[in-house]
Image (cartoon, rainbow, N blue to C red):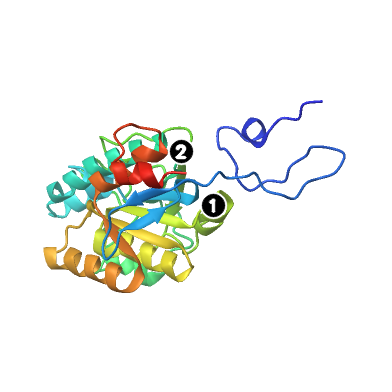
Amino acid sequence: MTHPGPEDRYAPLRHRNRWQFPGPHIDLHRPRLASRSATLRAEPATVVIDPSRTALVVVDLQNDFCAPGGWLHGIGVDVSVLAAAVGLSAQAVSAARAADVPVIWLNWGNRPDQANLPPGVAHVYDPAGTGEGIGSRTAGNGSRVLTKDAWGAALVDGLVAEPQDIHVDKYRMSGFWDTPLDSILRNLRVDTLIFAGVNSDQCVYATLIDAACLGYDVVMLTDASATTSPSYCHDATVYNTRQCFGFTASTPDLLDALATAAGDSKGNKENKENAV
């Protein structure tokens, strides 16, 4: 008798943390993940990653932060400085999918009733206490700010989620607090997280730090991450990521590294020699 595999029973996600049922016993071995190697030029050192144990985490590339008419634009912030990161993140996402690296969209998506929103977080977005922050309709098109299922929480134009991608709503600067992100990553059985998104010095960085403290390997894509803060904030984030938490890399170097894992002939010679 042929038993359906995890891909069939739990489509569209290919679950990596399931028991096997060959019969007559239950086999507690998890599905085997074939080890692969890709050499990624990074700072402060080049690293070899296993794409089978890697996920791409894309943070807050949503309308309220990145789009004209979104909340940030509506309060007078120049969001055009984020456009390049959006485009490069789209390239990283395509390369990750081609290399069978899970893509996780991590966006603000607050509950409409804000039942789990602490006052300190509410204050960040409404410092004067006028009610114009999270949940308000102060965005240019009347969408509720940073609220689940609202226009402002949706991916900005230029980014398209695929059915196999994973979406996680977050409620803090860090995507790990009060969310299923850590459980999802552990079920994916990944060790290495590649980060892109905005703002690099705030939500990207807070999530990256928590990931490193939880034991994940972390790599920040410096050009696919951006901020509306002064440029020195991004520079300090890059410095501290290299100094204290992990590594930084560029999107072109990631594309080159993942090309090998995807079986693409464009992979560089060093990657090909290290591929297994």
Q: Amino acid at mark 1?
A: Ile
Work out whether residue 267 or residue 238 is closer to the camera in this orientation and state it: 267
Q: What SS does tag 2 mark? A: loop
Q: Nearer the viewer, mark 1 or mark 2?
A: 2
Is the N terminus in the top left, top right, bottom left or bottom right quadrant?
A: top right
Using a 10 Å C-alpha cutoff, classify the residue at mark 2 as few (fewer than 14 neighbours), some (14 to 19) or many (20 or more).
some
Q: Residue furthest front?
A: 273
Residue 230 visible in image: no
Residue 21 horizontal/vertical position (percent): 78, 39
Q: Earlier in the sequence, mark 1 or mark 2?
A: 2
Q: Amino acid at mark 2?
A: Asp
Work out whether residue 170 or residue 133 is closer to the camera in this orientation and state it: 170
* Residue designated by label 2: 100
Residue plotted at (29% across, 49% down)? 137
Q: What SS does tag 1 mark? A: helix
Residue 150 horizontal/vertical position (percent): 36, 42
Residue 5 horizontal/vertical position (percent): 68, 33
Residue 174 horizontal/vertical position (percent): 39, 63
Q: Say left or right for 180 vs 153.
A: right
Residue plotted at (41% across, 42% down)? 149
Q: Say left or right for 9 vs 175.
A: right
Q: Are marks 1 and 2 in contact (CB under 8 Å)?
A: no
Residue plotted at (37% across, 39% down)? 260
Residue 200 visible in image: yes
Q: Is residue 72 above or below residue 11?
A: below
Residue plotted at (27% across, 43% down)? 142
* Residue designated by label 1: 184
Using a 10 Å C-alpha cutoff, classify the residue at mark 1 as few (fewer than 14 neighbours), some (14 to 19) or many (20 or more).
some
Q: Is residue 16 above or below residue 94?
A: below
Q: Is residue 4 above or below residue 19?
A: above
* Residue 34 image-quadrant placement: top right
* Residue 157 image-quadrant placement: top left
